Image: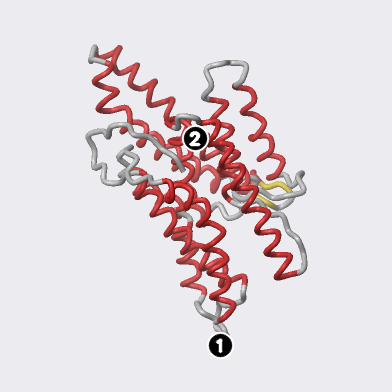
């Protein structure tokens, strides 16, 4: 995902977006190792098992860290890409290619073509929503409702395909964007009430405020989903996320996100596009290895 070159605030800013992506990639691989092992019946106490259930749950818990990191970087991509519309289109193109690839994979392995939307589709929908919300033209802003409505219909099972992360994914992305807006409001209010130079406050505190507000909203959101779990059910399924309590492990992503410096870091072309290709390739490799074991 693309991100910014903004200066960091006075805070322990140890991680560029490059390292956030690396953390996202590693935790995603760990998650898919657990998911693939379960899919191939290699979890449990049988002789064919590679992991017991405790290790399986640990792998999936670590994997919860990945999506919030990518969701946060979606905001960075929209805010700081030179051509944010191209960034959104690229996300949709890669998500479509990956989803078609998965369908062909299921056709080969199970003789059935299954079109299943990957998490990249959820990120693409969220990116398109933020793209239109961030437009200066007020007539374009309502278009942001389209990806939100698509996510709602998917969560209600009114679409022929399922979008991973249902309402959880796009809501989290919107919350991270709201954090960006609230940080600006906070700086304006602080400047007016204290008389401090606004530009000085922006340079030193706005990004820190944004990260802290993001963390606060994420925590509240995650807890509300758990607390109102039974109220958010539709035909027995949670509209936001299937296992809201287990998804609390995603809050661990706040550790690297809080340490984010706001700097781009290493961003060679091969790495930027390799992030997209890595998703289907690592899943295919994990499946192949586990099938041979």
Seen from the viewer's position, the closer of residues 147 and 265 is 265
Read off the residue under disc 2.
175
C-alpha distance separating marks 1 and 2: 45 Å
10 Å neighbourhood of mark 2: few (<14), some, or many (≥20)? some
Badge 1 marks a residue whose secondary structure is: loop
In the picture provided, is 137 more to the left or to the right than 72? right
Q: What number is the disc on residue 47? A: 1
Residue 52, above or below 136? below
Horizontal and vertical percent position of residue 1: 46, 43
- Report which quarter residue 58 is drawn in: bottom left
Q: Residue at x 25, y 27 (%)?
A: 204
Say how the picture is coloured.
secondary structure
Residue at screen point 43% across, 50% down: 270
Q: Residue furthest bottom?
A: 47
Q: Secondary structure at mark 2?
A: helix
Q: Position of residue 241 (x, y in %)?
A: 59, 50
Asked whether 157 or 262 is in front, the reply is 262
Mark 1–mark 2 CB contact (< 8 Å): no
290 with respect to 215 (left or right): right
Residue at image point 59% right, 77% down: 291
Judging depth in this view, the residue of 62 and 144 nearest the camera is 144
The C terminus sits in image quarter: bottom right
Q: Is residue 28 left or right of residue 120?
A: left
Q: Which mark is residue 106?
A: none
Between discs 1 and 2, the one toward the N terminus: 1
Residue 233 pos. (x, y %): 67, 47
Q: Nearer the viewer, residue 180 or 140?
A: 140
Q: Locate residue 263, reporting x and y percent.
A: 32, 38
């Amino acid at each position: 995902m693309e991100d910014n070159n903004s200066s960091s605030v006075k805070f322990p800013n140890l991680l560029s977006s490059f390292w956030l992506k690396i953390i996202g990639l590693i935790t995603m691989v760990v998650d898919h190792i657990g998911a693939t092992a379960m899919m191939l019946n290699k979890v449990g106490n049988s002789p064919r098992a590679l992991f017991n259930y405790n290790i399986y749950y640990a792998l999936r818990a670590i994997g919860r860290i990945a999506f919030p990191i990518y969701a946060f970087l979606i905001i960075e991509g929209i805010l700081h890409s030179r051509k944010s519309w191209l960034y959104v289109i690229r996300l949709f193109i890669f998500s479509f290619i990956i989803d078609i690839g998965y369908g062909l994979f299921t056709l080969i392995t199970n003789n059935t073509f299954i079109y299943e939307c990957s998490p990249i589709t959820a990120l693409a929908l969220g990116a398109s929503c933020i793209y239109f919300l961030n437009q200066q033209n007020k007539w374009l802003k309502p278009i942001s409702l389209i990806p939100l409505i698509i996510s709602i219909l998917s969560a209600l099972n009114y679409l022929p395909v399922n979008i991973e992360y249902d309402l959880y994914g796009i809501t989290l992305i919107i919350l991270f964007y709201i954090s960006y807006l609230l940080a600006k409001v906070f700086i304006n209010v602080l400047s007016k009430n204290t008389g401090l130079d606004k530009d000085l406050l922006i340079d030193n505190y706005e990004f820190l405020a944004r990260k802290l507000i993001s963390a606060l909203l994420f925590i509240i959101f995650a807890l509300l989903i758990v607390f109102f779990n039974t109220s958010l059910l539709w035909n027995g399924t949670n509209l936001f996320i299937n296992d809201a309590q287990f998804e609390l492990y995603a809050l661990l992503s706040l550790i690297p996100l809080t340490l984010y410096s706001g700097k781009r870091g290493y961003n060679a072309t091969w790495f930027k596009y390799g992030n997209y290709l890595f998703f289907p390739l690592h899943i295919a490799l994990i499946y192949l290895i586990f099938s041979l074991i």
